[in-house]
Image (tube, grey):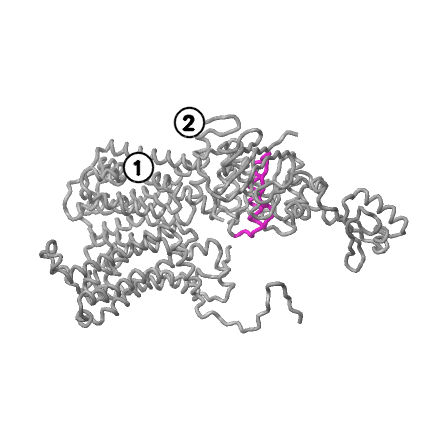
Amino acid sequence: MATVREKGYYHWDGQLTEARFPWWPITRTGILLAFKKRGFRFLFAGAFLPSVVFLAIIYISEHLGDFKFWARGSEKFITITPGSFKIFFTNPGFLFLMIAMLVFAGAGLIADDLRHNSLQIYFSRPLKKTDYLLGKMAVVFFFILVVTLVPGLLVLVFKVIFDGSFKFFLDYPWLVLSIVGYSAMLAVFFAFYTLLLSALSKNSRYVMILVFMIYLFSDILSGILQGIFRTPYMSLFSIRANIEQMGAFIFAQKPPQAIPVVLSFLVLGGVCGLSALVLHRKIRSVEVIR
Amino acid sequence: MKPKASAGGPSFWTSFRRVFAFFFFLGGRTGRSRVFFLLGLIPVAIAVMVRIVLAGRTGDVVAVFNEILMVFFVTFDIVILSLFYGTSIVAEETEGRTLPYLITRPLSKTAIFLGKYAAYVTLMFIMVSTSLFLSFFIMNGHRFRDPALYLTFLRYAGALGLGILAYTAFFAFLGTFLKRAILVGLMFGFGWENIIQYFPGSTQKFSLVHYMKSLMPRRPSGGPLSMLLFRLEPTEPAVAVLTLVVIAAAFLALACWLFRTKEYLFEE
Amino acid sequence: MTAVIETKNLSKWYGNVLGLSDVSLEIESGITGLLGPNGAGKSTFMKLVTGQMKPNIGRVSVGGRDVWNNFHLFRRVGFCPEQDAFYEDVTGWEFLTGLLGLYGFPPQEITERAVRALDIVELSKDKDRKIRSYSRGMRQRVKFAQAVAHDPEIIILDEPLSGLDPLGKRRLIRLIRDFQSAGKTIIVSSHVLPEIEAMTSRVIMIHQGKILAQGDIHSIRDLIETYPHMISIRCSDARALAARFVPDKSILKMSFGPEGRSLVVETHQRDAFFSRLQTAVVEGGIEVEEISSPDDNLQAVFDYLVGK
């Protein structure tokens, strides 16, 4: 059989192997595209601010003598416990920053592909639907874990360093697992949440609004219903409140709402399940338009 | 803006009306408008629930509407709708690459911009006022014979309408020159507008929501439900109306000028 | 003939990138082909002519009036953009009637014009389907329909044949020629040179933002003295014919086509060669099947001008 050769082309005699992580190029591209937006870089840097503040508090708590002049009477409040970690991780402002990051970096993940009919191009490669979704989710995982897991573990390490002993770590050996578990829970939930909304529209501006609006609206609705019905079960409508419940459970603290934590888990799990269903239906290489 | 009637060309108002009709039709039929309309009906569902749960406690029912549902309208619904539709005036055309269809028509760019603005403001007002009408009269059903009730409703509707005008004009202005107007708009609408309300004195006057709240029918502050008018140091209603109108007009003028002079290049 | 569209020293930059450089043209009525490769400046030129962009230097006028922010002109102009972009969730009919409404026609006239335009582009049966369900070719045709529905005097078409099948292209080309017969001024851009050749012999060649040549394609070719003309003769005995031309000093080069059935000659003196060819053929008793000029077409002319 004749082979076509031209200058610069050489026939490959080796074996073709499948890429081990076919989702990785999708993730890498998603992360790089996010960082290309100047505003996002500021926001991303700002997302570390709560961690810096927490670190400062830990430092002050270990050097109370140096800060006696303005810390008088507040010694009780800046004793670092797992509860402090829970407060840091479930702080509404911190969660809001994460939502802002997702608005920037996550809204267009699938919406832009739908707009530009890129799904056909993706699936004409040796790429499965799960690879595609995993690649997109990993973008969200990256951003959430970088601002939660990494600072969380670093703060713990610095606590031990400032303490000068392993006492804190030995007193709460499960704290590492709590930090990892909570960060993973946040990452998984926000990934499903963001991709669910991104898959609903080709218009990334509309998805940005949805990401923000649904998060905020769930809180407002919960507040309104709690005000009317005066029952803590209305907090189940709030994404933020459910995350706080889960956070309290993971950090072995008393949940802020007097409702079983399993209900919050079911609500968040339900959102993830709905997202999986929608993504399964929407992500197709061929779209039939009637 | 003076209407022009030159030979072979339409007057400004004629162009404005044509663009209004076109985008009122287009805007109303998108899935997004339906979603926003349904979102706006949530207060109606809450109103029905409240009437059932708090049956007989008319004072509490009215308080829920005045201080809770109005919080939803004023600080959330209006802002979200205005942000999306306001930034869409230009962003929709540039992202969708449909701008050539408009600017190669015998229509002035000012008429295009204002016609689209008017269409979207009208759509939003229909959405909001429908929800407001239903929730208000469900919750105040015991007072149908009181003429003051209808005046109160008109005040609420008027305040929300002026809020829509002002917010949409501001976000439309952002949309004419910012690529990521939505993000700046979110920071303004849910950051600045929320935070500034807690500052006493004239600092409050640097927010649009202050003037909307100044137009709301007031009740004595205090009690657990005084969320809406918390820390409000109101401006005189006439001044508040004028301020909102002037703000809307100023941002619209700036936006029209930018839209006329700027070239919008599509990303290749 | 008075120019319908005139540009004087027209230049446009995109930041540091030159889109169009010092273009001075007069375009008369009839079909004018604007051709050049991708990125040559064709769309930039069309956007300047349709007032979508403002020139950095120079001016562009339609009917003697500047285009930028002069929206009154657009009653007479129809533009078919290159982008495959439409308003969402509308049918072909709604798209067309909606845009016609912007001209201020009364409702009955809108309906008549829309029906006529859809008939012209053969989309009447599909008018009530959503545009997003249309094929590429159908979308291209509805774009063309919105450009002509209001019966403009000047029609500007940016890559109108893109996405059409060969039959569709032929139909649209025939349509464009019909518009020319009706006295309209049409500018058509394409980077596919045979498409332009099929529509018109009057071309503007553009490359890297500059005008290479303007006018009738054959006249342009004749003006290119640097390059010799190529003439291909398919005949019964190409070698015998070639032998007769060997002593001829005006012949620069001769080569034989596949299987020796044709002779390809390069010469600077085309007219003189043809008269000598007649003599050679008669004297040699050679049967000539076909005579053609492989380089007397747009691609060859373009390649010469660009220096390939």
Q: Which mark is residue B162?
A: 1
Q: Residue B222, position in %: x, y?
A: 14, 44
Relative to B161, C134 lies left or right: right
Amino acid type, label 2: Lys
Q: Which mark is residue B225?
A: none
- Disc 2 residue crowd, few under 14, some 14–19, many 20+, Cα 10 Å: few
Relative to C279, A96 lies left or right: left
Amino acid type, label 1: Leu
Cα distance, mark 1 to mark 2? Answer: 24 Å
Asked whether the viewer can see residue A209, the reply is no
Q: Residue C297, position in %: x, y?
A: 70, 46
Relative to C137, B36 lies left or right: left
Which stretch is magenta?
C133-162
Find numbered disc 2 in the image and state the secondary structure of the residue it sits on. Answer: loop
- In the displayed structure, B7 sits above or below C291; it is above
Q: Chain of mark 1?
A: B
- Disc 1 residue crowd, few under 14, some 14–19, many 20+, Cα 10 Å: many
Q: How many marks?
A: 2
* Residue A230 sits in quarter: bottom left
Closer to us: C26 or A115: C26
In the rendered image, the quadrant that contains the N terminus of chain C is top right
Residue at (29, 43) in percent of width and height? B132
Q: Residue placed farthest to the left in the image?
A: A73
Q: Nearer the viewer, mark 1 or mark 2?
A: 2
Residue at (26, 57) in percent of width and height? A240
Q: Chain of mark 2?
A: B
| Residue pointed to by mark 2 | B2
